[in-house]
Image: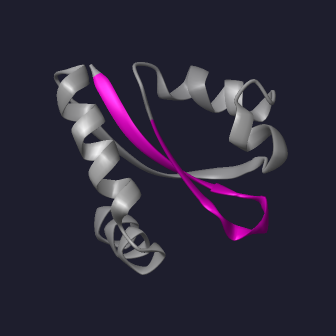
């Protein structure tokens, strides 16, 4: 399984990524093992979406990264 996820970071920024293990990836972000979140530490996981293939997850990640902040927040709100 592959996952697309959105993190809320310090300062209110939103980070979108893709992984096979959401818990491990969040720990990597918290341990500052990822470039963006080493400077903007994550506060919480806001969104996850599961995919059967890496290709599907990467396509969705690219789509979400093109969203405005408002549209990302709407996506998060609909998933709650």
> Which residue range is magenta in the image?
2-17
In the displayed structure, 74 sits above or below 13; it is below
The quadrant in which residue 3 appears is top left
Q: How many marks?
A: 0
Q: With 15 as the anchor, is 43 left or right in this view?
A: right
User: In the image shown, does 48 or 13 lie closer to the viewer?
Assistant: 13
Q: State whether residue 28 is above or below residue 69.
A: above
Q: Quadrant of the C terminus?
A: bottom left
Query: Which quadrant of the figure has residue 51?
Result: top left
Residue under the point 43% across and 80% down: 70
Q: Is residue 56 left or right of residue 77?
A: left
Is 34 drawn above or below residue 14 in the view shown? above
Q: Residue at x 58, y 26 (%)?
A: 25
Q: Residue at x 44, y 43 (%)?
A: 5
Q: Indicate the colouring scheme.
A: one colour
Q: Residue furthest bottom?
A: 70
Q: Is residue 5 left or right of residue 57?
A: right
Q: Magenta stretch: residue 1 in it?
A: no
From the viewer's perspective, is residue 12 above or below residue 14?
A: below
Q: Quadrant of the N terminus?
A: top left
Most common secondary structure along the magenta stretch: strand
Q: Is residue 7 magenta?
A: yes
Q: Quadrant of residue 18?
A: top left
Residue 4 lies, in percent from the top left, at: 37, 39
Whole-percent x, y for residue 26 in the image: 62, 32
The residue located at (70%, 29%) in the rendering is: 34
In this picture, residue 14 sits left or right of residue 79: right
């Amino acid at each position: 399984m592959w996952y697309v996820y959105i993190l809320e970071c310090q300062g209110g920024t939103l980070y979108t990524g893709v992984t096979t293990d959401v818990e491990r990836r969040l720990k990597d972000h918290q341990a500052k093992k990822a470039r963006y979140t080493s400077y903007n530490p994550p506060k919480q996981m806001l969104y996850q979406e599961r995919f059967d293939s890496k290709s599907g997850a990467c396509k969705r990640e690219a789509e979400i990264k093109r969203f405005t902040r408002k549209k990302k927040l709407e996506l998060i709100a609909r998933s709650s």
